[in-house]
Image (spheres, rainbow, N blue to C red):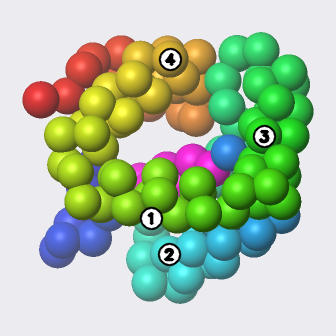
Amino acid sequence: MDGGAGRPGRILLLSAPVGEGHVAAARALAARMRRLWPDAEVREVEDTGLGHERRDRALQTLYALTMRAAPGLYGIGYDMLVRHPRFAELCKRVTAGLLGRSLGPRCWPPSGPTWWSRPTR
């Protein structure tokens, strides 16, 4: 849905609740978007999909362990996403396939967009 004149009508800000820094960053982005585009519907979703309680705990644990034991791995992962577009595209497709369908209904009401049910090309 277009907000007209190049403004977004709807914005979905999806974050994984793995640490307070991630959540704070998502909230700050949402607040900025609301100021920039007051007519847009900005929805914040902190979720990882079906079975999210166990998945969230696992992500939080793995993130904390990585930051304590091998923080460089996190940077390597981001570098791979930035420097290797094919790897980034693969990651997007895998993530969308694993999480998209389970997150979609929680992100927008059933009458909303159906982007989660179609692969993009």
Q: Quadrant of the C terminus?
A: top left
Camera-nearest label, 1 or 3: 3
Badge 2 is on which residue? 33
Estimate how packed mark 4 is, as few (under 14), some (14 to 19) or many (20 or more) residues with alpha carbons within 10 Å. Answer: some
Taking the image as shown, residue 118 lies to the left or right of residue 11, namely left
Q: Between residues 87 and 41, which one lies in front from this camera angle? A: 87
Secondary-structure class at tag 4: helix
Q: Between residues 5 and 50, which one lies in front from this camera angle? A: 50
Amino acid tagged 4: Leu
Camera-nearest label, 2 or 1: 2
Query: Height in image: 47 above or below 41?
Result: above
Camera-nearest label, 4 or 3: 3
For the residues bearing labels 4 and 3, Cβ distance under 8 angstroms: no
Taking the image as shown, residue 1 lies to the left or right of residue 74, namely left
Residue 10: image location, x then y, percent:
41, 53
Badge 3 is on which residue? 62
Q: What residue is at 50 percent from the left and 75 percent from the top?
A: 33
Amino acid tagged 3: Leu
Estimate how packed mark 3 is, as few (under 14), some (14 to 19) or many (20 or more) residues with alpha carbons within 10 Å. Answer: few
Amino acid tagged 2: Met
Q: Which residues are magenta?
A: 10-15
Query: Height in image: 59 above or below 52?
Result: below
